[in-house]
Image: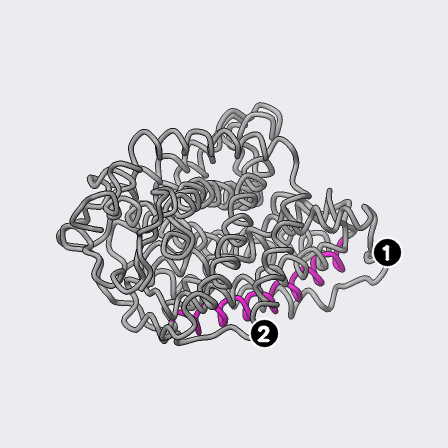
Amino acid sequence: MATTSNPSTLFRRKPIDTIDDDSGGEGGLKRHLGLWQLTAIGIGGIIGAGIFTLAGTVANGVAGPAVLISFLVAGVASAAAALSYAEFAGLIPKAGSAYTYGYAVLGEIVGWFIGWDLLLEYTAIVAVVAIGISGYVGFLVGQFGIDLPAWMLGAPGTGDGHVVDVFAIALCLLTAFVLTRGIRSAARFEFVAVGIKVALVVLIVVLGVFHIDSANYSPYFPFGFGGVMTGAATVFFAVFGYDAMSTAAEESVDARKHMPKAILLSLGISMVLYVLATLVLTGMQDYKDIDPASGFSSAFASVGLGGVANVIAIGAIVGIITVLVTFMLGASRVWFSMSRDGLMPKWFAKTDPKRHVPTRVTWILGIASAVLAGVLPIGVVAELTNIGILLAFVVVCTAVIVLRYRQPDLDRQFRLPFMPIVPAIGVLASLWLVSFLQWETWVRFAVWFAIGLGVYFGYSRKHSKLAQPSER
């Protein structure tokens, strides 16, 4: 049994064999999700702004046609982490994902760090995606000849006269509303929307392949190898939606069995679609002409397929909304878990007595993401998301190695292969990608981390359930 007898309370661990006894507060969370609903939530989190927005942004100004390589590099790093998540998901089927895993294996301060980190990262991802959808809304509105005031079309600095991104704000608040209706309703919406999104990507590939001009692939590395790696670090947030999906383990009907499968299925399906879609995008249009805000719509419009461009814009809006749902769901479950453990005020852990979801934190997250989406450019917010997720991957991959050797006989429903090589690859790849992020991103992250340390030492350490005599 993992104990909390460590002399340093900073590294007291939450015993794995007691995690299933956690109480979900008033009403708790309810188990409604099956394998394919979980997989849909995972795909919903992975495929979205990465294809419809960031692929164009990175191709245009960072990696050129080699954006495909950027996605593959990010995918390899993500796959190593995905296998680590899958092992933990089959062992610890509780809300919280990386936060819970880190807390149980590496200690409270590590769990706190990852939980605090994920609150910012997931919220920022919601903002990034909302900004991305807003770009397609603007494109679609323009196609119908509607001239909207410039002040409402983007954050300051993103265009002439831009003051605030009204569409992005509205989308964040709409997502919070959907999630407060209950996990069953949210999952039903996600399943349908993901089906539309996958069909749309397939349509893009099938139609776009006939308009590929091989001359657009030359030069393939216009920004050099450094551009490819910077691109990989930037698009990385587009290949890890499965980790947010794993926060819903406590709402799965058979989490130990279904969660590992859903993680691997969602990443595998998504990576195939990413490779095909980026190949078509950079083949249809010279990378310098790709519209960073609505890449595929502009690419199809450039070859005279304006009608298809409109369909893509509509489909992208519907499809990308699934990412908002997945990551706001993830953020709310991490916050819920931290509050249940006493690291945040228990007021946040209370769930709606009828719908059994943490409505309080969901609305707070909806408002916070709306503020970020309304006033910041997409590139700034996208890099902010990646640094935290990459560091979370380092923690999860490290923790799976430590626990495999510390407690090798635990009942693991899934055991990742080639231990410890695979998780070690995840650690090294994540650290490598972190090194390509801009220094401003590190500064913003350091500020958030410093605030988190203040909260931990000022409140969380003494209010932790593990600090209470009855919990020792």
In the rendered image, the vertical position of residue 236 relative to residue 199, given as above or below: above
Q: Is 376 located above or below residue 465 in the figure?
A: above
Q: Quadrant of residue 421?
A: bottom right
Report the coloring of the rendering.
one colour
Instruction: Where is residue 381? Give x, y as percent.
Output: 54, 37
Three-letter amino acid code of the residue under disc 1: Ser
- Indicate left or right for 254 with 218 as reference: left
Query: Badge 2 local density, few (<14 within 10 Å), some, or many (20+)?
Result: few
Magenta stretch contains residue 426: no
Question: Are discs 1 and 2 less than 8 Å apart at CB?
Answer: no
Please identify, in this view, whether the residue under mark 1 or under mark 2 is nearer the observer: 2
* Residue that lies at the very extreme toward the front in this rendered image: 7
In this rendered view, identify the residue nearer to me: 211 or 48: 48
Q: Name the residue under label 1.
A: 218
The residue lying at 45 percent from left, 53 percent from top is: 323
Q: Overall secondary structure of the magenta stretch? A: helix
Reading the image, the residue beneath label 2 is 418
Confirm whether residue 141 shows in the render.
no
Decide: is 63 above or below 278. above
Q: Which amino acid type corresponds to the residue marked 2 in the rendered image?
A: Phe
Residue bounds of the magenta highlight: 259-285
Horizontally, residue 114 falls left or right of residue 78, namely left
77 left or right of 24 in image: right
Count of numbered tags: 2
Which one is nearer the viewer's eye here, 351 or 159?
Answer: 351
- Looking at the rendered image, the quarter that the N terminus falls into is bottom left
- Image coords of residue 307 (percent x, y): 60, 57
In what element is the residue under mark 2? loop
